[in-house]
Amino acid sequence: MKNFRYKVQAFAFVTCVLLVYGIGFNVEAYCPFGAIESAFTWLEQGRLICSLGSGNYFALAAVVLSTLLLGRVFCGYICPLGAIGAFLRHFAGDFGFKQWNPSRRTDRILGLGKYLVLVIILFLTARAVDMVLRKVSPCYLLVSVNNDIAVTAWLAGGIFVIGSFLVSLPFCRWLCPFGAVLNIFALLSLTKVSRDMAGCTGCGKCSRKCPMNIDVASCKTVNSPACISCLECIEVCPAKNLQGEKVLSWRFFGRFSLRRSSRIIGVVLLLAVASVSLASIFVDIPTFYYTRELAEPAKIAYEELEIKGVTCAGSAQLFAHYLNRKDILAIEGYLTFATRPRDGWIRVSVGYDPAQTDRQAIIEAIIEPYYEEAEKRWRPSTFEVKGVELIE
């Protein structure tokens, strides 16, 4: 099982690196924690933070469902930072280095840090409408192809690597804000490590092996939300019950022992990845809404346009600026638009009063240069409308 887990982690980590640095894929748009960070902004202002999209919410749904079913398998098998921490823990053992493990009381106190980090991130992100702590996150080194990565991010990455060698998964246990979120759902997980108390010898190997410092030996059922379903405790357990089965087992609803755990986890993870991919392709959820504060007309018409150049929340704001232009191409009847910013051609739905404007006027407002009165100059449009050519 341990080898299976390391293989899955290595595959997930290498895939992430290749996607980001090989083809420049925006992995941030599928980070489940990004959905948590941007939730307030989306609900209050109708838009997501730059670099994020509906894929973040599809990924969050998949992670939450898998957590409710099998526990924190995302943390134990998919998370790239979790993978780095696991491999550094493994290497420390290979070098004969004994990692520091605090008392469980100290561990619980330090574990409160991740809830504090979560609150700080949510508060600052909501105020700044941006991922303000990105520059001090070790994860940013993995998901950004920007050559101007802040020194603080490199410093955070270095601390993360050194810390993960000295202590078993310190970031996951004490600082990870997404771990704080998943703890809520992990408490409701249908699958947990359980013990046959009658056959237990009390050797304590399961507790010493746990990378999350859970006192497995004292539990009939491991209800700790910190469990990442690595199942190393089951693998190291030497005791067997009267039926010749291991005292520790992974049980569904506390009754049904799941013997082929690697296959079950593999299938669930594959289904989760496939679901996120298919949803991103076929489900088009607008992630940026803009509405002018105007009286609603008797009739509202909607124009569906294929636009290029609306790549993030910032360019979507600029798009709204062009529709709200005050020069000779101003359109009085424009009311609202909804879109899903990302690279390439995207669909934009524009609502307007057909008694005051029409499709042609809207297109001209989008693609024609805008006159900046303060600067006394024309600003060329950065947007394109599919099927429409700009006449010089």
Image (cartoon, grey):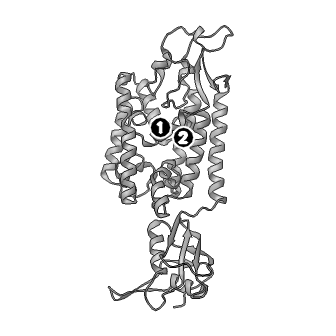
Q: Is residue 138 above or below residue 171?
A: below
Q: Specify the quadrant of the image occupied by residue 7.
A: top right
Q: Is residue 98 visible?
A: no
- Neighbourhood count class around disc 2 (C-alpha, 10 Å): few under 14, some 14–19, many 20 upward: many
Q: What residue type is labelled 1?
A: Gly
Where is residue 28 shown, x and y percent of the image?
A: 49, 54
Above or below for 98 versus 121: above
Q: Mark 1 points at which residue?
A: 82
Q: In which quarter of the image is residue 363?
A: bottom right
x then y, percent, for residue 339: 56, 68
Residue 137 at x, y percent in the picture: 38, 47
Q: How many tags in the picture?
A: 2
Identity of the residue drawn at 53% across and 57% down: 23
Q: Which numbered marker is on residue 276?
A: none
In the figure, residue 347 lies in which quadrant?
bottom right
Q: Nearer the viewer, residue 299 or 122?
A: 299
Categorize mark 1 by other alpha carbons within 10 Å: few (<14), some (14-19), many (20+): many
Where 267 sits versus 61, above or below?
Answer: above
Q: Which residue is drawn at 38% across and 33% down?
A: 111
Residue 284 shows in the view = yes
Q: Residue 241: where, in percent of width, then height?
A: 63, 10
Q: Nearer the viewer, residue 131 or 270?
A: 131
Query: Could you tell me how far apart the alpha carbons at marks 1 and 2 are, in whole angstroms?
Result: 8 Å
Local SS, label 2: helix
Mark 1 touches mark 2? (CB < 8 Å): yes
Residue indicated by mark 2:
78
